[in-house]
Image (cartoon, grey):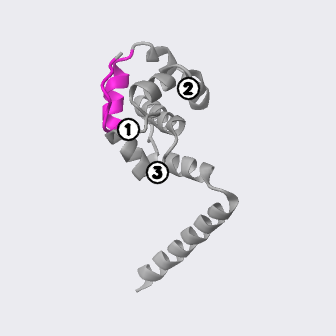
Amino acid sequence: MDDTIPKTLEECYLILNNIEDLDEWLSCNNEKSALVTVHHTIGRWIRNTWGLWQNEKNELVLWFNDNEIKHPDDMSSIILTSFYRYKKGFDINLEEQLEYYIEYWLDDKQKLKRKREKKLNEIDGKKTMLY
C-alpha cells in the first residue's frame, strides 16, 4: 500500500483506487455495512499511515480541523464514505457528512444554540431575498 499522505479528498481517492483489497468492499450495496466492515482494517490503516492520530498537523488533518472535524475516526469515516459514494457514482454529500460529525460531538445546549442560529440565518436569508 502507498504510504504517501494525501493532502485532499481527491488525493485520498487516488491512493485508495490502487488498493486491490477494496474491490470486494466496493461490491457491497449497503453503505453502512460496507463502512463497518472496513473501519478496523483500511480505516485503521488510513488513521495510522496518514497521521490522523498524531499531533503533527499535515494538510489533510488541517483541512478536517478547519471544517470542525477533530476525531481521526470521523476523518477516516468521511474519507471512506466519500470514496465509496464516489466509486458508486453517488453524490458524496460532503457538507451533510461534515454536519453529522460536528453535531455528534455537541452537547444539548450547543445543539440548541446551533439550531436557533440556523433558523435565524434562514429567516434573514428570506428577508434579504424580498428586498
Place residue 30 in its image quadrant. top right
Image vertical order of residue 16 relative to residue 109, above or below: above
Name which of mark 2 and mark 3 comes first in the sequence: 2
Identify the residue at horizontal 33%, vertical 24% (top origin): 15
Is residue 105 rendered magenta in the image? no
Q: In this view, does 54 lie to the left or right of 117?
A: left
Q: Confirm or deny contact between disc 3 and disc 1 (CB under 8 A).
A: no
- Read off the residue under disc 1: 56
- Read off the residue under disc 3: 95
**Residue 16, how many percent across, how many down?**
38, 24
Identify the residue at horizontal 34%, vertical 38% (top origin): 58
Q: Residue furthest bottom?
A: 131
The residues bearing labels 2 and 3 have C-alpha atoms spaced at a distance of 21 Å
Image quarter in which the N terminus is found: top left
Please state the extent of the stretch shown in magenta in the rendering: 2-19
Dot 2 amino acid type: His
Is residue 10 rendered magenta in the image? yes
Q: How many numbered marks does the figure carry?
A: 3
Q: Nearer the viewer, residue 88 or 1?
A: 1
- What is the secondary structure assignment of the residue under circle 2? loop
Dot 1 amino acid type: Glu
Question: Which circle marks residue 39 in the picture?
Answer: 2
Question: Which circle marks residue 89 in the picture?
Answer: none
